[in-house]
Image (tube, grey):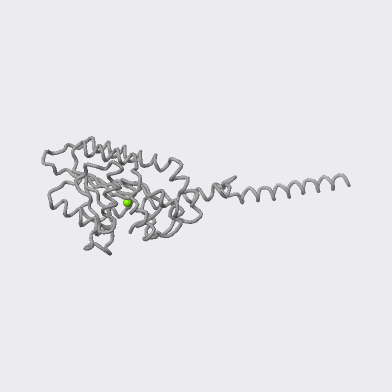
């Protein structure tokens, strides 16, 4: 009698534990992620953020999320940024190699200047890679020094375009009056020689958005008879609006957004 009761109790306990265990297993989500460290979670977030800004799904952002400071630093300095620019440049060169130029001298190409031809990465290092808000006076002082280095893959693209016979127009939102000479000197010191025209923002475009200013410049070029084959910039505002050109190419820039 006693043994039978003990056995029944044992069976009940086994059933009880089985019930608890199955409840616990059922509570697990099908895609539960194991071993996600806080660092990994931040990196995952920052990768999503960077993809969203590069694809123009996040717009009008003023600063890089502060938790992404180390992530953006690693992206910019660790080689991935340069690899991304190199990869895009190879795509551009592949496209260029398939273009038949006419002999009228009107085959044109547009390049943006800041963080397309020449880099402001060292300036932005002091601005925590864009975690600090835009500082117009600070940027102007930096640009006046004329020390922006060329971005090597884009410099190679520039040389290729000039040698192939394209008329290369460098179009920048930099203010002509205050930054014109420093910009010319900076570009020349980095080897950007042989372009057709450097077009800066004149007083008449002051206060206008980059999209309006750059569209108007491209319209003027088209009215002059130029055929814009390609348009390269690090900002979506370089590549939106009118008279965009036959193809546009977006270079990476997770440090700032120009409307
Ligand atoms: Mg730019």
Outermost bottom residue: 207
- Tell me where residue 31 appears, x and y as whole percent: 54, 47
Residue 81 visible at all: yes
- Tell me where residue 72 appears, x and y as whole percent: 46, 49
- Tell me where residue 195 appears, x and y as whole percent: 21, 44
Q: Which residue sits at x=20%, y=57%?
A: 216
Camera-nearest residue between 58 and 157: 157
Please tell me how many numbered marks the rendered image carries.
0
40 relative position to 184: left or right: right
Residue 1 visible at all: no
Camera-nearest residue between 29 and 35: 35
Rendered position, 131 above or below 97: below
Question: Quadrant location of residue 88?
Answer: top left
Outermost left residue: 104
Q: Quadrant of the C terminus?
A: bottom left
Rendered position, 166 above or below 200: above
15 relative position to 250: left or right: right
Outermost right residue: 2
Q: Which residue sits at x=82%, y=45%?
A: 7
- Tell me where residue 126 appears, x and y as whole percent: 45, 53
Question: Quadrant location of residue 130?
Answer: bottom left
């Amino acid at each position: 009698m006693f043994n039978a009761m003990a056995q029944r109790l044992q069976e009940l306990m086994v059933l009880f534990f089985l019930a608890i265990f199955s409840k616990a297993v059922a509570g697990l989500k099908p895609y539960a992620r194991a071993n996600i460290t806080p660092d990994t979670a931040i990196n995952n977030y920052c990768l999503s953020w960077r993809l969203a800004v590069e694809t123009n799904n996040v717009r009008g952002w003023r600063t890089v999320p502060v938790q992404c400071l180390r992530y953006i630093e690693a992206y910019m300095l660790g080689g991935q940024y340069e690899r991304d620019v190199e990869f895009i440049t190879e795509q551009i060169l592949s496209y260029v190699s398939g273009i038949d130029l006419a002999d009228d001298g009107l085959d044109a190409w547009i390049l943006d200047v800041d963080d397309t031809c020449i880099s402001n990465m060292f300036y932005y290092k002091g601005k925590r890679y864009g975690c600090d808000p835009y500082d117009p006076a600070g940027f102007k002082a930096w640009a006046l020094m004329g020390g922006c280095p060329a971005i090597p893959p884009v410099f190679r693209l520039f040389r290729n375009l000039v040698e192939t016979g394209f008329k290369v127009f460098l179009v920048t939102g930099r203010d002509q009056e205050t930054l014109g000479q420093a910009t010319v000197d900076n570009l020349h010191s980095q080897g950007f020689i042989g372009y057709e025209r450097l077009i800066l923002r004149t007083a008449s475009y002051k206060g206008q958005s980059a999209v309006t200013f750059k569209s108007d410049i491209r319209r003027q070029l088209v009215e002059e008879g130029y055929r814009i084959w390609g348009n390269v910039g690090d900002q979506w505002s370089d590549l939106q609006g009118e008279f965009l050109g036959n193809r546009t190419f977006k270079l990476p820039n997770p440090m700032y957004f120009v409307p």
